[in-house]
Amino acid sequence: MTRYAFIDGGYLREKFGVFTKTYFGIEETQPKSLDFDAIKTYFGGEKVFYYDAIDDSELRNESGEQRRKRLESQESYFDGIRSHYGYHVRLGSVTGTYKRLRQKQVDVLLAVDMLHHGFHRNMTHAVLLSGDLDFKPIVDSLVQHGIWVSVSYDQSGVSKELRWSADENDRIKPTDYWNWCRPEFREAHLNSFPKFASQRGISPVIAKTITLPMAVVEIHTIPGTRDHAAVSSSPIFPSGDTAIHHHDLDALEKFVTDMYGGSE
């Protein structure tokens, strides 16, 4: 079996940016904390094709020197991805007005490459990281051509029609994004990410109740700390006496929902 992965770079940057902002308060338009070797390992791809765009648009009140540095920063980011074994970067451009910028050519590049490698039998298994409905016809064509197609997606932005068109789909969870972070980043932010721990010492006071498709989760306070803990009587956590601890109530709720909420 030969597996190729195709990554919608704009989608990955957006969703990973939400992840780092939610748990660490960090906003990265070009996420230097991403470990692209870890992503390649996750997908098991012999080759990874990464699609994105150079934002060469003229921004309001931006000087020529500022624009030059912005473009150099983007080029450096994409060169860094290219340096990883098995990665191939394909770039489009950004067009539109100041308030309505959009990527140009990126979707076409990705679609053409997926079809090319599928029809030439360079791969037997294609993995698409995206949630864009525009890719459904490509997925349909590859499936009909005998290529096994997987769609990996973020729960916060995916077309269910795209998911259903694939042979299998994989919801990217917060723990996946965490494992895609560089080791030094994880070490520096270890205490900022939700962790599984014992239920001992949890207050009976319920701060919030989350109703999920498969379970009801209660978020309790932990006396003497600023932490909260999520517990459930349903066996969705690793063991019956396990709770999920985090200091931020909203971030903990998002973590539980994204981990165990599932898809329609």
Image (cartoon, helix red, strand yellow):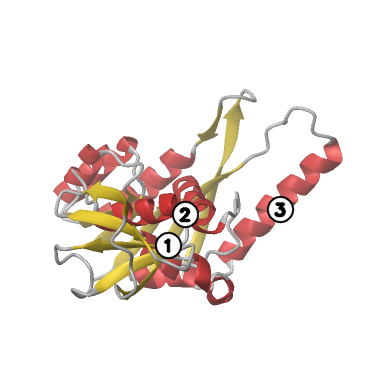
Find residue 177 and name its label: 1
Please say if the residues under marks 1 and 2 sit with CB atoms less than 8 Å apart: yes
Please report the residue visible at 44 percent of the width from the left and 46 percent of the height from the top.
Answer: 11
In the image, residue 188 sits, relative to residue 246, either above or below, namely below
Find residue 245 and name its label: none
Q: Where residue 64 sits: x, y (%)?
A: 84, 37
User: Helix, strand, or loop for circle 3?
Assistant: helix
Pointer 2 residue: 19
Mark in front: 2 vs 3 = 2
Q: Amino acid at mark 2?
A: Phe
User: Helix, strand, or loop for circle 2?
Assistant: helix
Q: Where residue 42 sits: x, y (%)?
A: 36, 69
Q: Using the rendered view, name the quadrant where residue 98 is placed.
A: top right
Find residue 73 and name its label: 3
* Disc on the earlier residue, 1 or 2: 2
Horizontal placement of 31 versus 107: left or right? Answer: right
Please say if the residues under marks 3 and 1 sit with CB atoms less than 8 Å apart: no
Give me the C-alpha separation between circle 2 and circle 3: 22 Å
Q: Where residue 251 sits: x, y (%)?
A: 43, 53
Q: Amino acid at mark 3?
A: Ser
